[in-house]
Image (cartoon, rainbow, N blue to C red):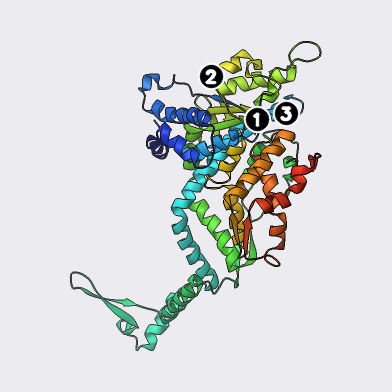
Amino acid sequence: MPSNRTEQTLARLADLTPKQIVAELDRYIVGQADAKKAVAIALRNRWRRQRAPEAIREEISPNNIILIGPTGVGKTEIARRLAKLAGAPFIKVEASKFTEVGYVGRDVEGMVRDLVESAIDMVRGEREAEVEDLANERVDERLLDLLLPPPPKPADGAHKEATASNGGDETDALGVFLVSGSGAVTKERTDPATDRYQRTREKLRQLLLDGQLETREVEVDVPATGPMFDMFASQGAPEGMENFTEMLQGMLPKRTKKRSVKVSEARRILFEQELEKLIDLEDVTSDALERVEKLGIIFLDEIDKIAGERSQMGGPDVSREGVQRDLLPIVEGSNVQTKYGMVKTDHVLFIAAGAFHVSKPSDLIPELQGRFPIRVELKPLTEKDFVRIMTEPENALTKQYAALVTADGATLDFTEDGIREIARIAAQVNERMENIGARRLHTVMTTLLEEVLYELPDGTSSRITVDPTMVRERLKAIAEDEDLRKWIL
């Protein structure tokens, strides 16, 4: 059975019907309705599987998907937004990294280990948010102890001397009377030094909360790091060597050293130390592994690069087919050993993507094809799509650049005709040169607003209007120059 926290994550999916998932994706991604529909069903099926009878639950396989389309049409963004919407661990890997495994490629199991690391970071972030207030309270107390160390407790001899100075009568020592709920009266001895310390501490607390002590210096204990095992972590070391290094370092006694820092820096150091005390790492690890197995999403990009291309000898490329056969057990379900424990990939959702300009999905080995039963072809972006991309999404480029200009006290406005002119030029450049989809808009917008952003905040009016005349003047070099190599992103 899933843990309570994993159940809460799955419960969020209960409120997301496929239509609602598509509607959420529409807020950030223009078009590609077929791809959104496919991933929405795949995500909803995860919740449906958890509600299926236990006898058949393990037999329900994830709906692995291949997204087919040129670069810049939204393949990666669809998968990334889907994972964020579901609160699922997510990583993106390029299949080409695994080319020629054994020579220059990576171990395919590394993608699962990376997914586990992503899940650990996600769950730890959630735990930190839960205990953040408590950790800050403890940090304030520790900072006050560093700024004003508590006074030593009075020894018995000192107490006797104080009693003797009062004529030998211990009951006459300085104290306060306490009345209990039953009416009994008791006398509690107090120390003037302690009273003064408490009053001073409260004054310092207020100064600390007001931020007036941030430049004071205090001494804090920080871990002492030694370079003796750094040689193991050199670039190009075999995969898994870092785990071995961590194991060796864990066997050594923990050493600390005193370091003099400002209160602002000490706050950060102490905050991290308090989080370590408040967060149960075993609980984080257990929850993260469970989320990987039940909710994990791996986006396998450039899968067309490992399709079975024919070599000069007439047979399939051995290294490419070898990568596919290495991927096969991971995709169909296997146990992968990570430094946090064993992970089953039976129900991890794999979303593959590729342009498939040269090869076709049918060029993949049949066994791997069978593990990606759903194929969706994404449509190339048109001029009308570019207009929508610059106006409809919540993070549209026009809104991003307007926010950047506002930071310098100016205002950036785009007219409808100006946006259409930008879209026309971007579509034209894609047709004449390499089609890089929506990424072309970044190139065009950067060139269009280069002078504006350079001149701000001096030498530019407080209100800049982007209209067709400005677009044609600034992008004249792109629109008319046949040699567009410098504008390729």
The percent coordinates of residue 229 (x first, y second) are: 72, 44
**Residue type for callout 2:** Pro
- Above or below 263: residue 61: above
Q: Which residue is mark 1?
A: 70
Q: Secondary structure at mark 3?
A: loop
Q: Is residue 115 left or right of residue 245?
A: left
Q: Residue at x 47, y 52 (%)?
A: 129
Q: How many marks?
A: 3
Q: Is residue 481 left or right of residue 42?
A: right
Quote the CA–CA distance across marks 1 and 2.
Answer: 20 Å
Mark sitting earlier along the chain (3/2):
3
Mark sitting earlier along the chain (3/1):
1
Corner quadrant of residue 109: top right
Quote the CA–CA distance across marks 3 and 2.
Answer: 27 Å
Q: Which residue is mark 3?
A: 105
* In this view, the mark in front (3 or 2): 2
- Above or below 124: residue 35: above
Can residue 82 be seen by looking at this rendering?
yes
| Image quarter of the N terminus | top left
Q: Is residue 328 left or right of residue 37?
A: right
Circles 1 and 2: CB atoms closer than 8 Å: no
Q: Which residue is mark 2?
A: 373
**Residue type for callout 1:** Pro
Q: Residue at x 50, y 24 (%)?
A: 63
The percent coordinates of residue 488 (x first, y second) are: 75, 40
The percent coordinates of residue 171 (x first, y second) are: 30, 82
